[in-house]
Amino acid sequence: MATTKLGFIVQRPPYKSENPKLALTHAIASQSVEVYLKEGDLVTADIAFIGDGVLNCIKNQKAMDIYKLTSTETHIKMALLLDLNILVCKEDLARFGLTENDIVIDAEEFGAEMKTKVVPFSEITKMMEEVNHLLFF
Amino acid sequence: MGKLTIGCFSSLVGSMTLDFAVKLCAAAIDKGHKVDFWVSGNGTMLSIKDQRAFKDYSALEKPLKELMAKGLNVTACEACAEARGYHKDNTMEGFKRHSMDWYLASAFDADRVLHIGGE
Amino acid sequence: MRLAVFVSDYKITVDTLDRLKAEKLGIILVGNGVYHTTIKENGNPSPLLKKSANFYVLSEDLETRGISSSNISGNIKVITYSELVDLIFNDYEKLAWL
């Protein structure tokens, strides 16, 4: 039985680039990876939004209403529903004048128990040190 | 010898990032390492067969086939490919298509993962 | 952690590199990142080169862009793809492409 930890670091804003969405969809895929692994083996995915990437977390996105596209907000909520660890850089939120009230913190309407964690960058550094591999988006 | 997993999300034509990734695959295989190569997003353009090799555009079908013959394991994100109209019947022979969990499974026992994001 | 960061652009649009902390940091210049080695914008060398890191540049990408490896300063190691593979496996445990 072994666990490989992956750290997904999202550093770009949504929509103009496909990168942030692909970070979330690939991280979510950690929930179905067992079909390829031996019983008991696991891949975990932690997601951190840093720099301009914190803009992905702004709530009340209307991409589905306007462009018929799943919003980044919905992807974040799906990740919370699947109990992925989501970190948002506190300093970067502050730089944009954003607070916890402005971003996706929970997905209670989906039945998710996990919540987004707003943390100092030092906590994100710690996560980066703890994982086996890093994937920057 | 180790295992290198490379993920590349950039287009075939435009940035030369896939050219870099394929050359790195070749160098690693030549040194006896195992290499898994995952393409997703615009990177799935790499999987299309019979691309005409103009000199003005990156064309990687030939080196890729040579690397597959040497053991390169190359897989495209099926959803990303289908979203772009790249179907199974026009996918290069030997180029696999799977869902995104394939990439994570490859990372599971990789010694190194180089993830190259897209545009 | 021993972290190798690949820089493939001359104009870097994210500030992540400034914030990364590593016991051993390698900066590998590939693609248009190789311009950091020689271009002196307004007479100044790239600020990237002031970082405390081990610097490497891919010879094939230098030559592609018409830059001779003889013009590269001594603190930047010119490497081939083959040497890059050795760096990846032997010198750094985590990789980041920014």
Image: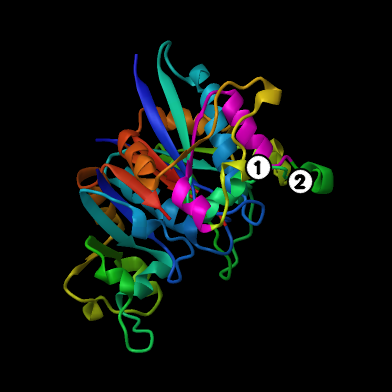
Q: Nearer the viewer, residue C67 or C91?
A: C91
What is the magenta range? A70-95
Which residue is tagged 1?
A72
Residue B44 in sight from this viewpoint: no
Q: Nearer the viewer, residue B2 or A67?
A: A67
Question: Magenta region, mostly helix, strand or loop?
Answer: helix
Amino acid type at image mark 2: Ala
Which residue is drawn at the image coordinates 25% and 49% (left, top)?
C22
Check the residue under mark 1 and report the chain it is in: A
Q: Secondary structure at mark 1?
A: helix
Which residue is drawn at the image coordinates 43% and 31% (left, top)?
B106
Q: Nearer the viewer, residue B92 or A116?
A: A116
Provide residue C17's location: percent of width, then percent of height: 36, 58
For the residues marked 1 and 2, what is the alpha-carbon distance in whole angstroms?
8 Å
Amino acid type at image mark 1: Thr
Residues tagged 1 and 2 counted as in contact (Cβ below 8 A): yes
Q: Is residue C82 above or below residue C36?
A: above
Q: Is residue C53 above or below residue A73?
A: below
Which color scheme does this rendered protein use? rainbow
Which residue is tagged 2?
A63
Provide residue C52's location: percent of width, then percent of height: 22, 62
**Left of B57 or right of it: where is A46?**
left
Check the residue under mark 2 and report the chain it is in: A
Q: Is residue B94 above or below residue C17?
A: above
Q: Residues within 10 Å of mark 2 (few under 14, many from 20)?
A: some
Using the image, tell me which numbered label, if any, was put on residue B54: none
Q: Secondary structure at mark 2?
A: helix
Residue C51 in sight from this viewpoint: yes
